[in-house]
Image (cartoon, rainbow, N blue to C red):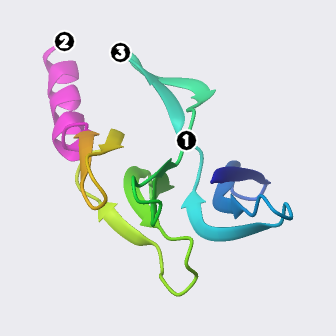
Amino acid sequence: AVFEREADLEGDDYRHRLLIIDTSDGVSRTIAEAGGIILRRTPYGFHGAPANRVPAWSPNAQSIAYLVMRDGRIELWRAFPDPSHSPQSVVTGPGDVLGYAWLDDETLIVEMTGDRERLAAEISRQRRLG
């Protein structure tokens, strides 16, 4: 599984699609949309370079976990090579997904940031205080 990135000139962004490639004939097939660009994060905030987005196959190879930038949030989704299954949101919430790992065929462990609204309110409060 790989990501294909395409420039979205109108939106001044990139659009990502998750593809699987048949190794017998090299034909690729889109299995999910993966949203806009995700910027690399450092301890001091976001960096201007794109993050290294690597989809992760489940241990039983029945699904693929991947990050999606949607509506300004980084979410965790799961797609399936079988076209009869639609992609599923695994984690959405008030914070961004920073990372994840498969524990078994159905369980993912997820690292997330704090609540974006609460963090923005705290930054605003700190600025007012000087």
Q: Earlier in the sequence, mark 2 or mark 1?
A: 1
Q: Main secondary structure of the magenta part?
A: helix
Viewer-proximal residue among 34 and 44: 34
Which residue in the protein does label 2 denote? 130
- Which numbered mark, 2 or 1, is in the foreground of this view? 1
Question: What amino acid is at disc 1?
Answer: Val
Q: Nearer the viewer, residue 127 or 76?
A: 76
Which tag is nearer the camera, tag 3 or tag 2? 3
SS label for mark 1:
loop
Query: In this picture, which residue range is highlighted in magenta?
Result: 112-130
Residue occupied by mark 1: 54
Query: Which residue is at 26% across, 44% downward?
Result: 110
As drawn, 124 above or below 108: above
Report if residue 62 lies within the magenta region: no
Cα separation between marks 2 and 1: 40 Å
Which residue is tagged 3? 43
- Is residue 121 one of those drawn in magenta? yes
The image shows residue 104, relative to residue 46, as above or below, that is: below
In the foreground, 44 or 87: 87
Q: Residue furthest right?
A: 25
Front one among 93 and 106? 106
